[in-house]
Each structure stands twice: as C-alpha cells, then as structure tokens.
Amino acid sequence: MRGDRGDRGPDRPDRACADGAHRLEARGDRRTGSLTLRPGDGPAADRQVRIYEVGPRDGLQNESHRIPTEGKLEFIRLLAAAGLTEIEATSFVRPSAIPQLADADQVVRGLERRPGLRYPVLVPNERGMTRAEAAGASALAVFTAASDAFTEHNIGLTIAESLAAFRPVLVRATELGWWRRAYVSTAFGCPYLGRIAPRAAIEVALRLVELGAEEICFGDTIGVAVPDQVEELTELAIAAGLVPERIAYHFHDTRGTALANVAAGLRAGIRTFDASTGGTGGCPYAPGAAGNLATEDLVYFLDASGWIHGVRLAGVLDAARFIAGLLGRPLASKVGQAGGWDPTTGAALPRP
Ligand code: MG
C-alpha cells in the first residue's frame, strides 16, 4: 500500500514493551490525589491524542443493513477528509462469517492512498493474511480476548489457540514491515464470565507483544468499565512493562461510561482511543444498546478539553450523516443529534 504510513513515526519508541517503564510515576500518583494532568500541563507532544477510527470495520461488521463497496469507500474518503489518519478499513475473516465485510479485497484495492494515511485491516489467520497481502494492505490488527469463554464463542478458539494462529501472521507482517496492532477484548468484563481481572488482560497483552504486536488495544467489549478500572488496568499494564505510547483503549458506550473512561485513560497517560463515526456498531450482547464510542462525541470532548488531534468535527459529522443515510437510520451519537457548540457565539455547530 504505497503512501500508507508503514513506519511508526519518529516520536514513538521501537517496542510496545520496555522493562521497568513506569511512566505514570512521572505524571503523578492517583493514590495520593496528584494525578491531575491537564492538556496544558505538559509539552505539546503530550497534548497530542490519536483517534483510531474503527467505523468501516468494527462499526459496519455489526450492522445488518448491507452497504455496497462504493459506499464503504466513500465513507472512508469522508473520514480521511475529516482529518482521520488511522482508519481500520475492513476485515479478512471468512466472508461467510461476516457477510457485510465479504468485499474486503475490493475495499482495500479501492482505498485512496496518501502519505500519512494508515488503513489497518483485521487479519484472523494465515489465509486472511494471504488475501490481505494480495489486496495491497500494509497494516493489520489481530483480535483475541482476555477470557477463553469469549474467544471460544466469538472465534471458536481458546486464547492460546488464537495466539498460535496469529504467530505466523505477525511474523509475516513483521517481515513485510507492516504496522501491527493486537486487540485484547473483554479486558474489563466478559458476557460469559463476568468481571475480568486486569492481570488476565495484561498477560494476553504481553504474549501479543512477544509475538510482534506494536500496539495493544484493550477493549471494553460489552461496555461495563468505569474510570477507576481504566486507571487500575493502565497502572498495572505499565508496571508490567507495557509502554503507554503503545497502549490504546477501545471503549463502548453501552452504559454511558465511554467518555468518562477516555478521561481516565488520559489521566493515566494513554493517548490513543478508538471510536466509530456515527456510533455505528451497536452492542451484540445488549440488543438495541449503544456500542462503539462515536467519533464525533470523542472529538467534541477532546476539542472542548484542549487536546490536539487533527480531526475536524464538521468533517466527522459529514461522514456520520453519510453512513447513517446508507444505513437508513438517524445518528446514534449525542453530538450527531445536538451538533457541536461554538463557545464564542453559543450556537450549535454545525446543525445535523
Ligand atoms: Mg467495538
């Protein structure tokens, strides 16, 4: 994928894991009440937040209304036009498993390539890797969880079996110089096991780093996490050697806690958050409830809090309206319904 941001950029360390890296200490200690990092407190680099867009993949894969390939490509073009630079484009799972994403090959072939744009694709196994490579991908994500019960239901493998399946995929991707992310879903709670201990999620994350993952994304798959748990998991993950710059969070707003959890992640030193434009995705474990945190809600929150991220709210709302139109339903997000807000005039901007 020419023009894809295959390298990691000059400001990022080479490994997702570093012995003894305990950067929270430099930012304060929440047990003493001094962990009060605000955007203005640190150097500019520390005010920079990455928004990782998951709408075209994670959002659409849970939508039953089928979107044509050209509609997906236009959605992705609008997301890039809004300033999003990391857009998870599709998934190379077996087409019969997720019919919505059966056109993964055509989607990747149709992507507009520009310097600074990265389009990771989900790759579950070697067969998917062969397809992704042939289509011209150059960044990937693999997907496992912190509980065997979830992976067995979701992908038909134990955690150990999923890691064994990823090994050749991550080896090949490393050989090719692809950017590599790994999801650890059910990091806070599992629909079959209940509460998940942070240690369980961190153990899986450390194994994924050993296999070559550059970024670990902890997912609150069923939307049960609260801020204290986010801070606890972050502290323990960093204490275990994961580098904060290589940790991402994927929150769901199923119970209305997603933005509070983002705030907790920011306080704990994390700067990468997933979101889905239009709030697409729903929650397969809570029919009718919200799933992915909406990108427009995240952008509004970050803008109003003074964080730097390079994404335009109006552009995200354009993309959100477009995909909601194709799905044939109103926008699920809060900001999609209310619009942004201009503090100098008091007006809602732009009106959805
Ligand atoms: Mg999700």
Image (cartoon, rainbow, N blue to C red):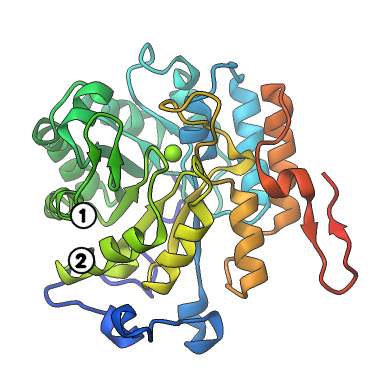
Pointer 2: residues within 10 angstroms few (<14), some, or many (20+)? some
- Let me know if residue 15 appears in the view: no
Residue at x 20% of width, y 43% of height: 170
98 and 123: which one is in front?
98
Residue sticking out furthest to the top = 96
Residue at x 85% of width, y 48% of height: 351
Q: Quadrant of residue 222?
A: top left
Across and down, in percent, residue 180 comes to 29, 49
Return the mark for residue 236: 2
104 and 325: which one is in front?
325
**Three-letter amino acid code at disc 2?**
Leu
Residue at x 59% of width, y 49% of height: 295
Across and down, in percent, residue 237 comes to 21, 64
Q: Quadrant of the N terminus?
A: top left
> In the displayed structure, does residue 253 sit left or right of residue 247?
right
> In the displayed structure, does residue 107 sit left or right of residue 6?
right
